[in-house]
């Protein structure tokens, strides 16, 4: 089969069949991903973070194909499934890997909240995907829990790529199921390897994460990740009862992988200026909607007009010029000139030093610092207004926030399965996952320059008053 090679900065040469290049890669919906940055506004902190969903999707394809081909060489894995069935799973997996992010709106996760879920779910139902899930016995749970970009991706996969996928002898509904972490064939009683195909794209050790943590570390230049990717790829294994797991080959590198995933989150995504840059851009999108009465991003806009980062940034530029005295214009100027305010603390050590362990009151055994951060997070809108009044500044110049990315869940890392001696246990059970108390995301407090000390004092006093008022002191 004729193939095309694409040189990738992370994985080297990636080889794709020409039919996939013509039917998927060289199409307008997929090429749109060249203009959707993987890390949204993080390039304003790490200048090299200009990589996009396009090269990430190619990387996930490369890893997914490589891992599955390795699995097929394991005699145990091939047992119980025909060659035709394994070929079908691999074709489905490769297409799902390529298309898993095709529904990402501009700026990746930042603009998802502007996608009308009612419209999305209507469009999903029109594709026949709901009926297909019901017929396979999966039910509606995967679609109910799906993120907006996953739902939009499913619409695009069926509507834009249905014919091409069927020409590859691939079921577009099964591709959507893989994207959501399920296999319709497996649910219908087909061999267990179908379920593993879906797990390769949606599990604690999926190739999606394996690519993006490697790529994000490489492209930002953060240098917080050092593990043997090839060793990890060779360590994938699978069994009927346990599903996808890592073999003992991973023992020499799994520790670095765990540490690296956490470090990348803490020092890139949760970097205080990354948090601010992405929060500012998200707020800009909200101000655009408020000022113009139009959503900056819509389902039809992405499908029909191929909205990407550049198109939406141009909308923001024009709106700021047309409304020069607006909050939108002020925020846009701050974004374009990268005038980022100070945060009251940059990490947990500074938070402990500036807030201190001597907070008044007995909190019933709770750690005062943890209680304070929880109080900040739960009352962020109210406390932003309190700080703005106390500092005599506009409320949009005071923000309490943490990373914009979907919730960071260390429990998922603890659940990574390691297979050895006929049994599969999690890295936590094997004692490979230590206490991560220090690496806990914290909320940042952004205030205008020169106002940090005053802001900290206002927050401390407000916290102590409220603790006392609740009768906990």
Image (cartoon, grey):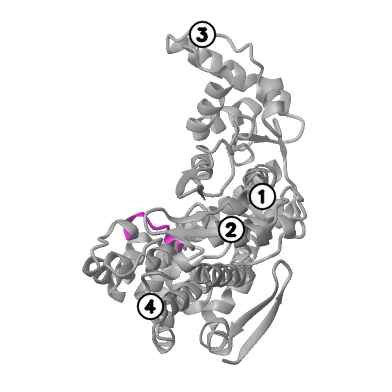
* Proximity of marks 3 and 1: CB atoms separated by less than 8 Å: no
- Label 3 to label 1, Cα distance in Å? 44 Å
Dot 2 falls on a residue whose secondary structure is loop
Q: Nearer the viewer, mark 3 or mark 1?
A: 1
Given residues 70 and 436, the one toward you in this image is: 70
- Label 1 to label 2, Cα distance in Å? 10 Å
Q: Kindly identify which numbered label has been placed on residue 253.
A: 1
Given residues 192 and 80, the one toward you in this image is: 80
Given residues 147 and 230, the one toward you in this image is: 230
| Residue 116 quadrant | bottom left
Disc 2 crowd rating (10 Å Cα; few below 14, some 14-19, many 20+) is many
Judge whether residue 402 is colored magenta: no
Dot 3 falls on a residue whose secondary structure is loop
- Label 2 to label 4, Cα distance in Å? 23 Å
From the top left corner, tell me how far across and down residue 356 is, in percent: 66, 17
Task: Check disc 4 and report the residue beneath it.
Answer: 82
Q: Kindly identify which numbered label has been placed on residue 235.
A: 2
* Proximity of marks 4 and 1: CB atoms separated by less than 8 Å: no
The residue drawn where x is 66% and y is 50% is 253
The residue drawn where x is 56% and y is 91% is 1
């Amino acid at each position: 089969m004729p193939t095309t090679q694409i040189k990738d900065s992370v994985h080297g040469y990636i080889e794709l069949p020409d039919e996939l290049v013509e039917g998927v890669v060289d199409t307008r919906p997929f090429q749109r991903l060249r203009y959707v940055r993987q890390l949204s506004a993080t390039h304003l902190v790490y200048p090299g973070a200009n990589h996009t969903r396009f090269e990430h999707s190619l990387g996930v394809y490369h890893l997914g194909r490589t891992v599955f081909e390795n699995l097929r060489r394991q005699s145990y894995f091939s047992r119980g499934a025909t060659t035709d069935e394994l070929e079908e799973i691999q074709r489905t997996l490769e297409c799902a890997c390529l298309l898993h992010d095709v529904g990402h709106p501009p700026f990746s996760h930042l603009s998802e909240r502007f996608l009308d879920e009612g419209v999305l779910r209507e469009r999903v139902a029109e594709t026949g995907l709901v009926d297909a899930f019901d017929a396979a016995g999966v039910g509606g749970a995967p679609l109910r829990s799906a993120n907006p970009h996953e739902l939009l991706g499913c619409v695009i996969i069926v509507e834009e790529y249905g014919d091409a996928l069927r020409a590859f002898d691939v079921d577009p509904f099964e591709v959507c199921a893989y994207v959501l972490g399920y296999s319709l064939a497996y649910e219908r009683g087909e061999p267990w390897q179908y379920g593993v195909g879906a797990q390769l794209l949606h599990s604690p050790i999926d190739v999606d994460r394996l690519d993006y943590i490697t790529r994000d570390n490489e492209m930002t230049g953060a240098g917080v990740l050092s593990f043997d990717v090839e060793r990890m790829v060779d360590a994938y294994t699978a069994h009927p009862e346990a599903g996808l797991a890592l073999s003992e080959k991973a023992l020499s590198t799994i520790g670095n992988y765990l540490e690296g995933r956490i470090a990348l989150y803490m020092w890139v995504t949760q970097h205080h200026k990354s948090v601010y840059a992405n929060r500012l851009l998200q707020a800009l999108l909200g101000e655009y909607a408020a000022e113009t009465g139009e959503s900056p991003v819509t389902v039809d806009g992405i499908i029909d007009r191929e909205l990407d980062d550049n198109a939406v940034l141009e909308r923001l530029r024009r709106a700021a010029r047309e409304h020069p005295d607006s909050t939108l214009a002020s925020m846009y100027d701050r974004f374009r000139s990268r005038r980022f305010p100070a945060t009251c603390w940059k990490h947990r050590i500074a938070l402990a030093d500036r807030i201190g362990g001597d907070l008044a009151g007995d909190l019933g055994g709770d750690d005062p610092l943890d209680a304070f951060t929880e109080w900040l997070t739960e009352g962020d809108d109210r406390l932003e207004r309190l700080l703005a009044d106390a500092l005599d500044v506009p409320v949009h110049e005071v923000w309490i926030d943490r990373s914009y990315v979907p919730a960071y869940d260390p429990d998922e890392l603890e659940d990574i399965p390691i297979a050895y001696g006929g049994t599969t246990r999690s890295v936590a059970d094997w004692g490979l996952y230590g206490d991560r108390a220090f690496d806990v995301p914290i909320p940042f407090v952004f205030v205008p320059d020169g106002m940090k000390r005053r802001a900290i004092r206002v927050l401390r006093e407000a916290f102590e008053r409220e603790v006392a008022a609740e009768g906990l002191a």
